[in-house]
Image (spheres, rainbow, N blue to C red):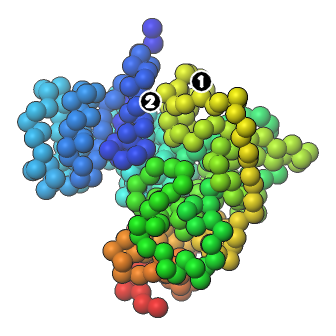
């Protein structure tokens, strides 16, 4: 009987975090929740702590903590409130794996702390590599950290790459559902409301990622993430539209062979694979029903209707400060759209305009990245068409 893997889940109350806890719940002999973190969902975090009895929980928003009955915690679980605790807690020696599922650039610092402690990291926070891909991958190599992808597309690529040698790789192909506005023209998307954009046809995600999927900025960020995760160039990455979300991505080798990973759209499968690699265990997600006809469509993306994709390829090729600027502008723009402050089509326009007018640095330090992030957010907040 092996000792259960001790897991910390950052962003435990979000869609990825709750799916991760479902995986842990399904394998109590292999995994235990050591720590959990949330931003302001105090009641949900308390409920998780009461079920899993972790050593600690962390709630960043102290006001949310004041409104939650944390006195109901068992004596086994220690509560930390306010910012700054997670970076120290993920580096504790008893931590085996850190699941990075915080949404947005806020996930960078705790993920980097886990990297510097040489932890195994199940990475769902793509912004970590979008913002600081060069720094994170270099530190991971130096510190002996292992980064395993949780995004369904990157998990698929990771799995398919095991079918051949890296030296024989021609390109990787990311699949995209196309979101709720597949087939729409850019002019038609001027009238999209937040309510319309939050209706994703396949995945159940939080509002920020759902809007990113609707603009296809999510796929742009995945292009950049793939460039750093797999050490490929922007020219070795392609995107195809696959509405059924059953083929999660492909790799193509120099001899023309194409290897894909397919499964029903359920995030518990890639999460579990990141936690159990190289082992494959029974998963709490549904099996494929091979007794029914299943059409699988593949279409080229409409780069004119979804200009975010081109920004993704551009940033993946350029690197430097371009990733942090793109991500910061998009986070602000999505928030402005959800508040009905800008039109849907202006989300990408903001990112485009500021990205192409920022002072580019090819090899920024971490401090310079934080500075560029702040500058870009200020620019995006006051942008007017």
| Residue that extends furthest to the right in the rendered view of this protein | 255
Which mark is drawn over residue 280?
1
User: In the image shown, does 308 or 79 lie closer to the viewer?
Assistant: 308
Rendered view: 54 above or below 104: above
Is residue 383 visible in the rendered image? The answer is yes
Q: Secondary structure at mark 2?
A: helix
Position of residue 293 measured from the top left corner of the image (x, y, whole percent) = 73, 37
Residue for point 8% across, 36% down: 71
Which residue is label 2 attached to? 23
User: In the image shown, does 18 or 169 lie closer to the viewer?
Assistant: 18
Rendered view: 8 above or below 239: above
Rendered view: 356 above or below 292: below
Residue 134, picture quadrant:
bottom right
Residue 246, picture quadrant:
top right
Position of residue 362 measured from the top left corner of the image (x, y, whole percent) = 59, 72
So how many labels did they put on this image? 2
């Amino acid at each position: 009987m092996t000792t259960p893997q001790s897991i910390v889940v950052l962003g435990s109350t979000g869609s990825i975090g709750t799916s991760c806890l479902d995986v842990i719940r399904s394998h109590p002999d292999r995994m235990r929740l050591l720590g959990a973190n949330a931003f302001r969902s105090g009641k949900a975090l308390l409920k998780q702590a009461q079920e899993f009895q972790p050593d600690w929980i962390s709630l960043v928003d102290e006001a949310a903590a004041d409104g939650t009955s944390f006195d109901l915690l068992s004596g086994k679980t220690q509560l930390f409130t306010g910012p700054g605790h997670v970076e120290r807690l993920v580096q504790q020696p008893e931590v085996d794996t850190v699941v990075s599922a915080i949404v947005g650039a806020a996930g960078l610092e705790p993920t980097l702390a886990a990297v510097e402690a040489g932890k195994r990291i199940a990475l769902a926070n793509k912004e970590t590599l979008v913002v600081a891909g060069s720094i994170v991958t270099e530190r991971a190599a130096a510190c002996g950290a292992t980064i395993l992808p949780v995004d369904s597309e990157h998990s698929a690529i990771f799995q398919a790459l095991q079918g051949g040698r890296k030296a024989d790789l021609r390109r990787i192909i990311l699949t995209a559902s196309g979101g709720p506005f597949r087939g729409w023209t850019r002019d038609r998307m001027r009238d999209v409301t937040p309510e319309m954009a939050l209706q994703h046809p396949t995945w159940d995600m939080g509002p920020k990622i759902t809007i990113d999927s609707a603009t296809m900025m999510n796929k742009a960020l995945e292009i950049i993430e793939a460039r750093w995760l797999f050490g490929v160039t922007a020219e070795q990455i392609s995107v195809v539209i696959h509405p059924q979300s059953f083929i999660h991505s492909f790799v193509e080798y120099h001899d023309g062979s194409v290897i894909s990973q397919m499964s029903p759209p359920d995030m518990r499968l890639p999460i579990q694979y990141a936690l159990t690699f190289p082992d494959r265990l029974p998963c709490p997600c549904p099996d494929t029903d091979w007794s029914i006809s299943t059409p699988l469509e593949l279409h080229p993306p409409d780069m004119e209707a979804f200009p975010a994709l081109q920004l993704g390829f551009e940033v993946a090729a350029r690197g430097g400060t371009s990733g942090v600027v793109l991500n910061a502008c998009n986070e602000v723009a999505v928030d402005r759209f959800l508040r009905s402050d800008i039109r849907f089509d202006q989300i990408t326009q903001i990112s485009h305009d500021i990205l192409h007018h920022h002072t580019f640095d090819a090899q920024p330090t971490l401090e310079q990245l934080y500075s560029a992030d702040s500058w870009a957010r200020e620019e995006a907040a006051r942008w007017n068409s």
